[in-house]
Amino acid sequence: MDKLLFGTAGIPLSSKGSTTAEGIASVKELGLGAMELEFVRSVNISKEKSPEIKKSAEKNNIVLTCHAPYYINLNSTESAKLKASIYRILSSARIANLCGAWSVCFHPGFYQKSAKEEAYKKVRDSIKEITKTLKNENNDIWIRPETTGKETQFGNLDEILNLSAEFDNVMPCIDFAHFHARTNGKYNSYKEFSEILEKVEKKLGKKGLENMHIHITGIAYSEKGEKNHLNLEDSDFKYKELIKALKDFNVKGVVISESPNIEEDALLCKKVYEKV
């Protein structure tokens, strides 16, 4: 990726059409550069529909990313749940790849009763299986474990960066609002955002900063972490300081707005970025 693109988590609310292909055209009309396919409940695009979506993305010069279903736990002790989780990520990666998508992100799972080291090994083993399977299928989509919003969830920064350093086609999805919520209000200043980006560069090199999949949203939280998403202006999240840090570190890749008003906050971030 040679620049930083801004986009929406799903079809823009203002889209005149309801199909994904029409949503991509709306993203272009809005002046944005990316859209995330939302498979949050299920992989809702068929093999048959994929070429139409790929064609629309290419025609409109829109980069597609994908969010795999929420029902994933790569640290599950139940064999059936673990297999289903791996299958959901593989299914998302396969369909996203057919759509021409660049990157697929997912919430890796929960610690449950495991020690953090034990959870890390289990998640790593599953990702190893996923990446091996996709490699055998000549599918080179980026696999992105995401930083998560609660302390009970696997996915702090070190865990995600360590996983990314272990595999060729794994890189982080960094959700800055999740950090802010996970730490009950910390990670909300230029200095702290810069520390995260410095850590990414230290662990993954310049490539880490030039290949970023980022989520941004306002967020409500408690001492237990994330509660729900908010529009940026209705939250305490210092998004302008984050955007300044992204610009100063010359970050490249995709920033996806997950705010309830998806395209408004994507456009707001793009405007701030262009002014900084």
Image: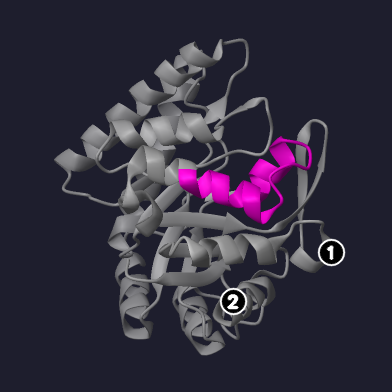
Residue at image point 75% right, 64% down: 232
Disc number placed over residue 15 in the picture, else none: none
Q: Is residue 185 rendered magenta in the image? A: yes
Label 1 crowd (10 A; few <14 / some 14-19 / many >=20)? few
Q: Can residue 113 be seen at all in this image of the molecule?
A: yes
In the rendered view, would you say 177 is above or below 16?
above
Q: Which quarter of the figure is the N terminus placed in? A: bottom left
Residues under numbered marks 2 and 1 in contact, where contact means CB atoms less than 8 Å apart:
no
Q: Provide the residue span drawn in magenta.
A: 176-198
Give the image location of residue 216, x and y in percent. Answer: 62, 58
Q: Which mark is residue 234?
A: 1
Question: Residue drawn at (41%, 63%), measured in percent from left and top?
Answer: 253
Dot 2 alpha-carbon crowd within 10 angstroms: few under 14, some 14 to 19, many 20 or more: few
Q: Amino acid at mark 1?
A: Asp
Which of the pair 168/20 is nearer the observer?
Answer: 168
Q: Is residue 212 left or right of residue 267?
A: left
Magenta stretch: includes residue 169: no
**Quadrant of image for the C terminus:** bottom right
Q: Position of residue 225 (x, y in %)?
A: 76, 36
Q: Residue at x 73, y 59 (%)?
A: 238
Q: Nearer the viewer, residue 82 or 34?
A: 34
Quarter-wise, where is residue 218 in the image?
bottom right
- Residue 228 lies left or right of residue 105; in this view the side is right
Q: Which residue is mark 2?
A: 276
- The vertical placement of 126 against 113, above or below, is below
Q: Is residue 170 left or right of residue 255?
A: left
Q: Residue 168 occupies which quadrant of the picture? A: top left
Q: Nearer the viewer, residue 195 or 47?
A: 195
Q: Earlier in the sequence, mark 2 or mark 1?
A: 1
Name the chief secondary structure element in magenta: helix
In this rendering, the label closer to the viewer, 2 or 1: 2
